[in-house]
Image (cartoon, rainbow, N blue to C red):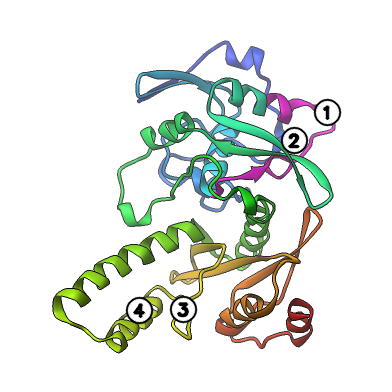
Amino acid sequence: MWRDIDPRAEERERPDTGLGRVGGYSDTNPGHGSEDPRDVFTRELELPRGTSRERVRVNGREYRLSGEDVRVLATVGAFRVVPAADLREPNPRTPTRPARDLERLRELGLVRTAPYVVGRSRTTLITLTGSGRNLLEGARRPGPAGERQAFHVGINKPRELAHDSRVYSAYTKAAERLAERGDTVRRVVLEEDLKRDYQRFLQAKNRACRERGESPDERERAIARWAQEHQLPYEDGHVQFPDARIEYDTRDGRRAVEDIEVVTPHYRGAHAAAKVRAGFSRYRASGARLGGLRTTGRSGRGVDPRLAEELLS
């Protein structure tokens, strides 16, 4: 993989500082101390970071990408589906620029776009294509596999799009709060990734149970230990999974996690009660917007009874 700056890029693509903080990050520690919550997803990538478009060749294919293009691709891949309106702040001087840039990425075959209604608001949902993920993976620096940011392709659960499309917005609110405390986000792990690891554990445990003749009680204790090791709530034989997990370093250098959950009007009954008890940081979806809710349980703060009543009514 190689990239070089096209000297004509500055003439055709004038830097637009109104689209967010771009450029100026070192290759050794990109994203550290950044005000843009998307920069963490480009940290492992040998791809452009500045305002000018550069030629990039990955796996035999050539593209022209700017740092903003890379942020969009990596963010969409990290969350699987993101509303276009959440990806870039509008700039009064160039109001059509974000839409044109997304259309260009679509024409390059790196993203797919689809109109959708979230709550009462019309939006465009963005997902990564296989070519988009190949680009990101081909530009990834070597590193421990267990600490890498995963990138996802396409829509996984069409029936849950209205819910899943809000997870990125919840992340930005949580990331802003962490940054204010001086914490540094390392990566985001989606619910599906946590569940995949859990299923691998279960399959291995089930084989061991058959071979060793372990009892159901022994299996349940093993599941409880797995949940504890992965800092996930375990209750009545079930492991609770958040919509997304933020892994971060605290200001004093400790590793920590924050689990976030998007609460929609469809949360009812036992499912809602379990989410309340789980201790996830919850964000209530109202239309296409999110409002923060009190964190409960594992954070040491109590359950908000008004929230429980509202969710369970």
Which amino acid type corresponds to the residue marked 2 in the rendered image?
Gly
CA–CA distance in space, label 3 to label 2? 47 Å
Position of 99 relative to 82 (above/below): above
The part of the image, by quadrant, that contains residue 237 is bottom left
Residue 305 in sight in this render: yes
- Whichever of callouts 2 and 4 sits on the residue coming sooner in the sequence is 2
As drawn, the label of residue 18 is 2
Mark 2 is surrounded, within 10 Å at the Cα level, by few (under 14), some (14 to 19) or many (20 or more) other residues, namely some
Q: Position of residue 283 (x, y in %)?
A: 70, 66
The residue that mark 1 highlights is 93
The residue that mark 4 highlights is 223
Q: Position of residue 200 (x, y in %)?
A: 32, 63
Q: 221 or 228: nearer the eye? A: 221
As drawn, the label of residue 238 is 3
Question: Residue drawn at (36%, 64%), measured in percent from left and top?
Answer: 199
Disc 1 secondary structure class: loop
Disc 3 secondary structure class: strand
- Whichever of callouts 4 and 1 sits on the residue coming sooner in the sequence is 1
Disc 2 secondary structure class: helix
- Image quadrant in which the C terminus is located: bottom right
Question: Residue drawn at (21%, 83%), measured in percent from left and top?
Answer: 214
- Whichever of callouts 3 and 2 sits on the residue coming sooner in the sequence is 2
